[in-house]
Image: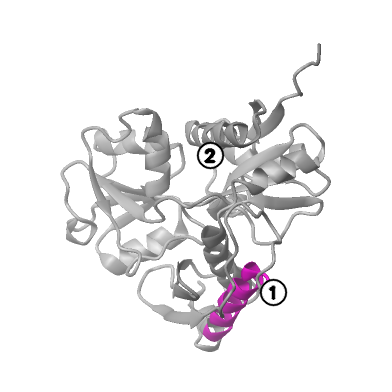
Amino acid sequence: MTSAPTPWRLGTRRSALATAQSQQVADALSAASGRDVVLVPITSEGDVSRASLSSLGGQGVFATRLREALAAGECDLLVHSLKDLPTAPAPGLVIAAIPSRVDARDVVITRDGTELHDLPVAATVGTGSPRRRAQALASNPQLDVRDIRGNVDSRLSRVRSGELDAVILAAAGISRLGADGRPVTDGLHLEYLDLNEWPTAPGQGALAIETRVDAQSDLRAALGELDHAETRAAVDAERAVLAGLDAGCHAPVGVHATLDGDEVRLNAMVYALDGKKSIGLDETTPLGSGYARKSGSGDGAEAADGATSDARARGVGEDVARRLLERGAADLAP
């Protein structure tokens, strides 16, 4: 009798949200491959420390331990919230798939439905994101914005208890936690923020599935089936803006890209931390005919003329970053 193949091991943080989104990927990968996928819980520094994300190093604090586990063979693949992943590639690892993105917006959650710009003087708003802090103060300078940590449930409980008047979260996290019917925001009011006025973190709403460059060919092939071409091109453009700004700008950044045919629209904003000033660009750029590739082609697939859609999208983001710096984006840093 032929034994069943060994299940693939998917490394995940232990939080409810990380586990939920990892299980969704595991189910999709199992359906695409016919092979079992099991979750391997991994604890990162960001999960055990209560210090602010900026003091822990900001972006990447959740990814480092997971990547170490993957490189050491403790698991076969990882699922990251793409917005939390550094733009620099990790040696020996590759983002093998970026599934179709869900809602990229931020959402303000309150007890009574008062919108962010109408909250009264000294209303307390919780967020751990410097970008959201800057955007909130730009929308309503009278707010008392507080740096908070904790999972989604703990943040919502602080609104329910009256400790905070509002919190700002990613809509994607709310929807993924509620995918199993769990009443995540029962009794609270949600204000979804327009991406045109409130661009979010590069890659927000998207997941990155990472594996080793020497991963089994059947795993790479199965992951390729989960890759979504338009999402990958859009988030590559967004992350290229962030990468380009990192060299000379430490101010909060919001950026969102959308694809329409052979064009990409990129809306990028750089904010002073107090929200009093911002510099932005909102432009639509042709990517050239034939750039698009089929979903499911995985990383590195080529466009009709030999250039990857990813490289073209990254070029758009790099150009936007250069122009933002020319307009003084680096001067907005505290």
Task: State the mark number for residue 307.
Answer: 1
Q: Is residue 34 above or below residue 119?
A: above
Mark 2 closeness class: few <14, some 14–19, many ≥20 residues within 10 Å: few
Residue at mark 1 to residue at mark 2: CA–CA distance: 44 Å
Q: Quadrant of the N terminus?
A: top right
What color scheme is it?
one colour
The boundaries of the magenta stretch are: 308-323
Name the spot of residue 244 as percent of width and height, x first. 62, 74
Q: Is residue 101 above or below residue 320?
A: above
Name the spot of residue 180 as percent of width and height, x first. 39, 28
Between 72 and 122, the residue placed more toward the observer is: 72
Query: On the picture, is 166 further left or further right than 155?
Result: left
Task: State the mark number for residue 84.
Answer: none
Magenta-span inclusion, residue 288? no
Name the spot of residue 258 as percent of width and height, x first. 44, 67
Query: On the picture, is 89 further left or further right than 82?
Result: right
Mark 1 is on which residue type?
Ala
Q: Residue at x 17, y 59 (%)?
A: 118
Q: Earlier in the sequence, mark 1 or mark 2?
A: 2
Tag 2's secondary structure? Answer: loop
Nearer the observer: mark 1 or 2; the answer is: 1
Between 145 and 309, the residue placed more toward the observer is: 309
Asked where in the image residue 305 lies, by quadrant, the reply is bottom right
Q: Residue at x 68, y 52 (%)?
A: 95
Mark 1 closeness class: few <14, some 14–19, many ≥20 residues within 10 Å: some
Q: Is residue 141 visible?
A: no
Task: Residue under label 2, please give it.
Answer: 50
